[in-house]
Amino acid sequence: MKTQLSIQERLKDLRIEKGLTLEQLSQQIKIPASTLGSYESDDYKEIPHRNIIDLAKFYKVSTDYLLGLTENRQHDNISISDLHLSDAALSLLNDQKLNTLLLSELITHEQFRKLMIDLEIYVDGLADMQVKSLNFVVDIGRKILLKRHNPDEYNLQLNTLNMQHLELNEYFSHVIDDDMHTIIKDIRDAHKGDIDSAPPKTITEHWEEILEKAENFVGTSKQRLAYIFSQFLKIKPTEKNIDDMADMLSQSEILEPDAKKRRNSARQKNSKSDKN
């Protein structure tokens, strides 16, 4: 996952969030759709000052956010003291060793507030007494029933029953783990299509798919091999590309042991013709 969004990505994300096509955005902001598309393309085009202001006003974000100078869309003037962060926390956030984009997605997830509440309950011990009371009530009920129905085994099983308490640490580890799992899974799913995310297929699966396609390729063995390389290297397998690559492969001393002899023979012939 990236640590910072480009200008193109910011503009595209903002447009998609509003559910607009380039044509629809063009109608509302009075900038040609082709121009807006060029602002979002990888082949970056410089955006005029006036258009930056118009886009920022339309999306209700700061111009600094559009230009990648800040990660804050609106809160440019927020005071650090209002955040109540410690010096250690501010240093950690400022040293750029954390992926702050990922951190932002984590704390803005709808489940994060529940995670913080559950953490606070655990850290402040707000549920300790209730858990102890619950274990006490369960123990009393067990002892009463055991003594009533199995008086001979009462003393033998008493210690076993006491060991079956609800453990506070174990309980909250499950609660917090469930909270985190929900958040992390949602963030992971949201980034599955990212260019810097792991590919959905393993290298083995990718090769198997390429080889299956190669079996249906019509051509010489060198052309088939050229096709395989083009697929793996993501080169468009046009007829010219395949022929050029096949020609290069035919010169390989590994694939064609006699290639070196043929080249030497050709040089000798050329040398003799030059002398004559």
Image (cartoon, rainbow, N blue to C red):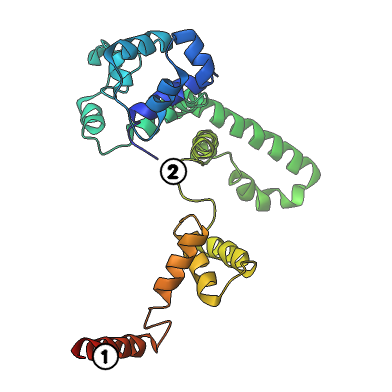
Residue drawn at x 37%, y 28% as measured from the top left = 8
Q: Which of 100 and 111 is in front in this view?
A: 100
Which class describes the residues within 10 Å of circle 2: few (<14), some (14-19), or many (20+)?
few
65 or 252, which is in the foreground? 252
Mark drawn on residue 268: 1
Q: Percent from the top left, x then y, of residue 74?
A: 34, 12
Quarter placement of the N terminus: top left
Image x and y of residue 263, in percent? 32, 85
Check the image and report above or below for 15 versus 199: above
The amino acid marked with disc number 2 is Ile
Q: Is residue 203 left or right of residue 48?
A: right
Q: Which label lies toward us, 1 or 2?
A: 1
Return the residue found at the far right.
149
Report the amino acid beneath label 1: Gln
Q: Which mark is residue 160?
A: none
Quadrant location of residue 255?
Answer: bottom left
Query: Dividing the picture into quarters, in which one does residue 32 lie?
Result: top left
Residue at image position (32%, 23%) is: 71
- Residue 188 is situated, as x and y percent measured from the top left of the image, at 50, 39
Mark 1 and mark 2 residues within 8 Å of each other at the beta carbon: no
